[in-house]
Image (cartoon, rainbow, N blue to C red):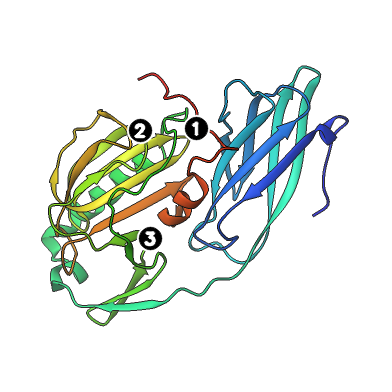
Amino acid sequence: MTLATIAIAAALTVTPSARAMQPGEPVLLTITSDQPLSAVTVKAFHVETPAFMFDPANPRRWSALVGIDLDDKPGAYAVHVTAMSPQGPLEKYIQLYVAAKKFPTRRLSVDEAFVNPPESARARIEAESKETAAIFEAGAPSRLWTKFVRPVPQPANSAFGTRSVFNGQPRSAHSGADFLSPAGTPVKAAASGRVVLAKNLYYSGNTVIVDHGLGVFSLFAHLSRIDVAVGAAVTESDVVGLVGATGRVTGPHLHWTVRVGGARVDPLGVLAVLSRTPDRPAAPKPPE
């Protein structure tokens, strides 16, 4: 695709930053201009999201977080940025080139009820699937987070995107990162936000979902205990529960999922692009 501009679009620059341009990776777009900007919007991967200022004192520099979904195919994807300036609207197109990535396969043995659920559980599973889908589609319209941190100190022990085979039967790809943390380890919110789900689910066990705003969500699964309630405001220092082995698991661990604009992305990639750095300071915590 050729670069499209309008009369004053040359003043708008869009710079992508990512751990890798591959399926399952978040991409931070930095949008700069020689004029103050307002109402900056980005459309990428068929999703439109508002941009934000990391530093409210610098309206010439904005950012937007977009996600390359786990199942997005290799190729070129258009990114369309629009903004308002004192002189009028600005518009810019760039391309992101997504490279191929081959994910590994893992074979696990679990309770047969979690592979082929009994008829009595199917209504519950369907209702929970609809509930979580609705949550991911109705996030807060403003940014609630300032930075992202690891929810537990232990390293991740299974790769995001791994294709799972449970009891010899292929299932959907692993859409999060697992941390082999001992049972009872406190799980901290990965970033500021608001709790939008805190309950036991059939597959993920005791589960907490935190809405970080602008289409960004964290899901923490298999907890032995939930320590927050729906509606609670949390920061990255707050404990949301304890590591456990509830739901479809082979042992105690934390499963952490992140969604960005509906895209399933690697939480470790989010940590890579949203850590606080000198040239990308964190914004003040928004009011509750």
Which of the two marks, 2 or 1, is nearer to us in this view?
1
Kind of element beneath mark 1: loop
Spot occupied by residue 48 in the image (x, y as percentages of width and height): 58, 39
State the residue at coordinates (83%, 52%). 2
Residue type pointed to by label 3: Ser
Spot occupied by residue 253 in the image (x, y as percentages of width and height): 21, 60
* Figure quadrant of the C terminus: top left
Residue 60 in the figure: left or right of residue 45:
right
Marks 2 and 1, how far apart at CA: 15 Å
Kind of element beneath mark 2: strand
Kind of element beneath mark 3: loop
State the residue at coordinates (59%, 70%). 100
Marks 3 and 2, how far apart at CA: 21 Å
**Label 2 sits on residue:** 193
- Residue 282's disc number: 1
* Figure quadrant of the N terminus: bottom right
Residue type pointed to by label 2: Gly
State the residue at coordinates (63%, 38%). 42
Residue 9 in the figure: left or right of residue 75:
right
Instruction: Judge the density around disc 1: few (<14), some (14-19), many (≥20) Cα neighbours within 10 Å.
Output: some
State the residue at coordinates (44%, 50%). 271
Spot occupied by residue 136 in the image (x, y as percentages of width and height): 38, 42
Query: CB under 8 Å between callouts 3 and 1?
Result: no
- Residue 175's disc number: 3
